[in-house]
Amino acid sequence: MNDASTADRSMDRTPPGGHPMSTARPRRVFFVSTDGDSMGGSQRVLHTLAQGLAERGHEVTLVSINPSRQPQSYVAAPAYRHVTLYGAPAPETPARRLPFPRRAGRPRRSPDEVAAAKRKLAGLAEEVTGGYMVVASPWAAHWISDVPMPHLAMIGQYHQTYEDAAGTPHLRLIRKHYAHYDKALFLCEEYAAAFTRHRLANCGVMPNPVGVFPDEPAPLRAPRIVSAGRLVRSKRIDLLIDAFAAAAPSAAEPWELRIVGDGPVRAALEEQARATGLGDRIVFRGQVADVEAEYLGASVVTLTSDAESWGLVLAEGAACGLPAVACDVSAGVRALVADGDNGLLVGPGDARGFAAALERLMSDGELRRKMGARSRERMRGYLLPRVLDRWEALFDEIDR
């Protein structure tokens, strides 16, 4: 599967406190997203990539079109430049009826605001004579489409599946804009193949990096299950609470469920947790500064989402040596968790099956240790140095 030896050799070039030194020539790289500072896995990936490439000697600018209403700090000492095009969040407006669905409360901007923001992006691009513009979403691609940047190579990213895009504006925008880019990147081979079958000829694969890989894995001694992510309905933390409540009484030890993250359904989830009668064994941690410590203090990582194209929590948990229980909702999840090898996969929405999988791992310490070791080894191919190597190889490919 992953060439672990190559990843290890790449890591040998790491300077103290930094990422592996690059043998590639320095490049100028722009990352553009609609909102690069909100809480979310894709935002964390953007900042991780920008920092990694900058520490390798590349000149990197992360461009957020919109400022976040609740900005997050992902890198303590950024080595890259971060620019926001609009000066303030736009006022929210009610949803309107359009030929395609518009998210409720989508911000609206005046023509003068839009023009000024686009001039700012054009000015950033004019500062360089060449480089690469990595566009992080179809909406970002649509927004920048009338900004003249012919001297930059264009790379589009899509972090979801073809099925997620079908029937939504995403597919139309990908076909309209990404088809003319130098490369369109997807998270795994299955996703790239699906878009290729549907008339997108320039598809490639670029996995998300796992930004954590501690020197020592989790000891797997604490009877603790961890979940991490934004608390929204699609993450199905309600299913996780039900499954844990069903599995916990049969465990020999007093297992604890830790839920890391925040979001609009937190209050409802806390009420559900209280109703289980498990008291303080279901703990809501909220947003934490050191998510790696949460993984290292746990023995099982979980994902219960109805839809998840990748699953950053699975990658980070695996890098810390945790076995996983996850809903089998995509090829991306299966790339991170092989059923019976480094974790257990359950049908989407199957609370009873999820409880049984939890109970199996909770009751078998040796199985947890074997699967945890395989998880960590599996993640070596997704380490940041390895993914940065792939980005540099892609730049070389485009230059040829």
Image: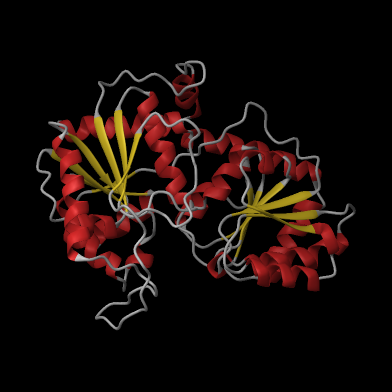
Q: Position of residue 276 (x, y in %)?
A: 81, 71
List the single residue furthest toward the right: 252
Depth check, front residue: 397 or 128: 128
Rendered image quadrant of residue 90: bottom left
Residue 337 seen from this side: no
Q: Position of residue 224 (x, y in %)?
A: 77, 49
Rendered image quadrant of residue 391: top left
Question: What residue appears at the point 73 percent right and 52 percent down from the top-left corner?
Answer: 225
Q: Position of residue 247 (x, y in %)?
A: 79, 63
Depth check, front residue: 272 or 374: 272
Residue 65 seen from this side: yes
Q: Quadrant of the C terminus?
A: top left
Q: Is residue 280 above or below residue 298?
A: below
Q: Position of residue 113 (x, y in %)?
A: 22, 59
Rendered image quadrant of residue 375: top right
Depth check, front residue: 143 or 88: 88
Q: Is residue 126 above or below residue 331?
A: above
Give the left or right position of residue 91, taking residue 29 as reference: right
Give the left or right position of residue 389, taking residue 283 as reference: left
Q: Is residue 107 above or below residue 213?
A: below
